[in-house]
Amino acid sequence: MSDKFARRDFLKTSIAAPAAAALALRLEERILLAGSSSNVSAAGRSTAGRAMPTGKIGDVTISRLICGGNLTSGFAHSRDLVYVSSLLRNYFTDEKVFETWQLCEECGINTAILRVDEQVIRLITKYRNERGGKLQWIAQLKITANDFSDIKTAIDHGAIGAYIHGGVSEGFVEAGRVELLGKALDLTKQNGAIAGIAGHKLEVPVACEKAGLKPDFYMKTLHTCNYWSANLKPENDNIWCTNPQQTIEFMKTVTKPWIAYKVMAAGAIGPREGFKYAFENGADFVCAGMFDFQVREDVIIAKDILSAKPKRQRP
């Protein structure tokens, strides 16, 4: 094959043959074939005039779809695929991260959830100072019983909110130290940011509600278990919400805003199914990790689901 026979030309030639094959293409594949990710596809134009729905957490207006930060930080739950994190770190150069964030803003996503580390702080600072980026940052805190410094670091660098990482919250709850979560909430609010608590396990929001804590929001995993590897053990890095129905029922009793995450079970579930399940079953916002070429598709899907006013029992 000639070097001049580019991959895009090969895809166009191969796919053009049977019309049925073209119809079977996912939207993100059609966007790639259409050319640069900066061009809106024909499918995207149909929803271009509809603004991304938003909601409030505290006094902050946040898009119903939030950009997750694991991928741009070079990390992904990858089950037994050992090369994935290295692949991500090589793919997400500074330029590619900025392109992804810019696409999010262009499509109406106004908030990202990002880690608190030197790399993220360098990137978000550079994005704002050199690109004029306006993307809001909610920080993921890795605090300890004796070190709450992530809170100040995040807010000093422009985070509009912060939440305690799910694994950290679970450790505190299991150790009977729920008061540490309350202390982190208070410190975050005192510094002018919205404050939340995350958990993969339902025991986290249950314990927080029982203790009378007052987070501005919860982050709780939610996805179906209708994928083959969900039958494996959770510790095999393949399941993040082991009791979705119990989560749904409990969250009906909670009045704080709920950001659902891991809604696609780290790529095992498609965005249309994952977003719909989350919004219909009580989530107020969805956090989704996205490659640049997935942003437009995910936004279109979220807009379609929300514009249809999904039936839900949780207000």
Image (cartoon, rainbow, N blue to C red):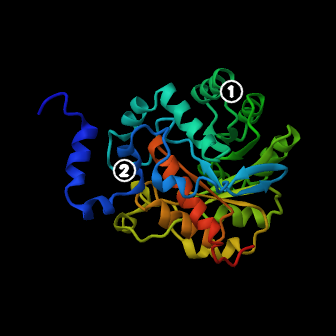
Residue placed furthest toward the left? 1
Q: Residue at x 38, y 51 (%)?
A: 30
- The residue lying at 72 percent from left, 64 percent from top is 207
Sequence-first tag of 2 and 1: 2
| Callout 2: SS | helix
Q: Circle 2 sits on which residue? A: 29
Question: In the figure, 214 relative to 190: above or below?
Answer: below
**Structural crowding at the residue carrying mark 2, measured as other residues with C-alpha within 10 Å and reported as few (<14), some (14–19) or many (≥20):** some
Q: Residue at x 73, y 43 (%)?
A: 162
Task: Give the image location of residue 14, x and y in percent.
Answer: 20, 49
Where, by quadrant of the figure, is residue 229 drawn?
bottom left
Q: Quadrant of the N terminus?
A: top left
Q: Quadrant of residue 237?
A: bottom left
Q: With respect to residue 215, does 242 lie above or below?
A: below
Question: Residue 100, percent across and down?
Answer: 53, 37
Per the rendering, the mark at residue 132 is 1
- Residue 175 seen in render: no
| Quarter placement of the C terminus | bottom right
Residue at horizontal 68%, vertical 44%?
Answer: 110
Residue placed most toward the observer, 62 or 189: 62
Q: Residues within 10 Å of mark 1 (few under 14, many from 20)?
A: few
Residue 299 placement (x, y as % from top left): 56, 53
Tag of residue 231? none
Is 162 in front, or is 210? 162
Relative placement, left or right, of 264 versus 4 is right
